[in-house]
Amino acid sequence: MTLQPNTIENQLIEEICRYISEDRTPSQFEIARLKREAAKLKNGNRAVYAAIMGMIACLDNDIAECKKHHELAILLDGSVEHYDSYCTSLYNLGRIQDAYLWAQKGLSIFPHAPKLILSALKSAYFLELFDKVAEHYRALIPLQLVDIDQQVQDFFQNAEIVLSMGIPEPSLHRLSDILESIRVKHGADIKTINLSLIPTEETQELFNWIETSSNVDTTVEMNMELCEMLADQPDIDLGNMTVAFRACRH
């Protein structure tokens, strides 16, 4: 019995999502098998075929192929789903700035699409664009979603903590570019962002810890680069916030 295209599509997407959720890298043999199964969709919906090939390229850590296929899918069918799947692949490849860019492109066409708002919010959070996190969170409110994930609420609450420090938005955005350039250079994955608000006699100090997959030695190097880059741009005003990378605790 031959599987129908929609069945093949659903099974492939489920399998790809399982690799991602289990944080498991498929072997080259498994990648080849996924491509063979995807080829059965080639003569059907070309956009769906391209999107799935983009997802498979993501699993294979092939950024160029991932971008090529996903952008073809959007060119053929610029649906919310194709924008969202591209953002997901970019995020999983560690290309968070690109993921945020494409979420914004999607939102320029579909401004009320919950998937794209959530994708933009998540990317903005890990880029430390906290003003954008708050903006996207507020865009969800009029949609009256039945349930907003607790993690999303936590992202917003953390963003509000940082914004309460009165740091100018241009400084936050330039800091974001610096942090992301260092992270990508060292191939570090962000695991979490920990904020510690410490009261002092006159005010409060905020310690912003970015926990990554890097080891201790690499983390030290990343922090040295961060200090040097901030020293080169003295007009960046972080107020009472200290930001640093930290090796993720296991």
Image (tube, rainbow, N blue to C red):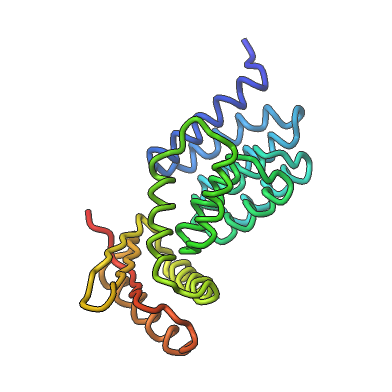
State the residue in front, 170 or 186: 170
Looking at the image, residue 249 lies above or below residue 24: below
Residue 197 image position (x, y, % from top left): 27, 65
Identified at 46% across, 64% down, the residue is 128
Identified at 33% across, 72% down, the residue is 244
Q: Which residue sits furthest front?
A: 202
Residue 189 seen anywhere in this rendered image of the structure:
no
Looking at the image, residue 89 lies above or below residue 44: below
State the residue in front, 27 or 148: 148
- Quadrant in which the N terminus appears: top right
Identified at 68% across, 46% down, the residue is 111
Q: Quadrant of residue 74?
A: top right
Number of labels in the image equals: 0
Q: Quadrant of residue 192?
A: bottom left
Residue 40 image position (x, y, % from top left): 67, 27
Identified at 51% across, 35% down, the residue is 16
Residue 240 image position (x, y, % from top left): 34, 77
Looking at the image, residue 131 lies above or below residue 55: below
**Is 188 left, or right, of 137 in this rendering?**
left
**Is 250 left, or right, of 194 in this rendering?**
left
Residue 224 seen anywhere in this rendered image of the structure:
yes
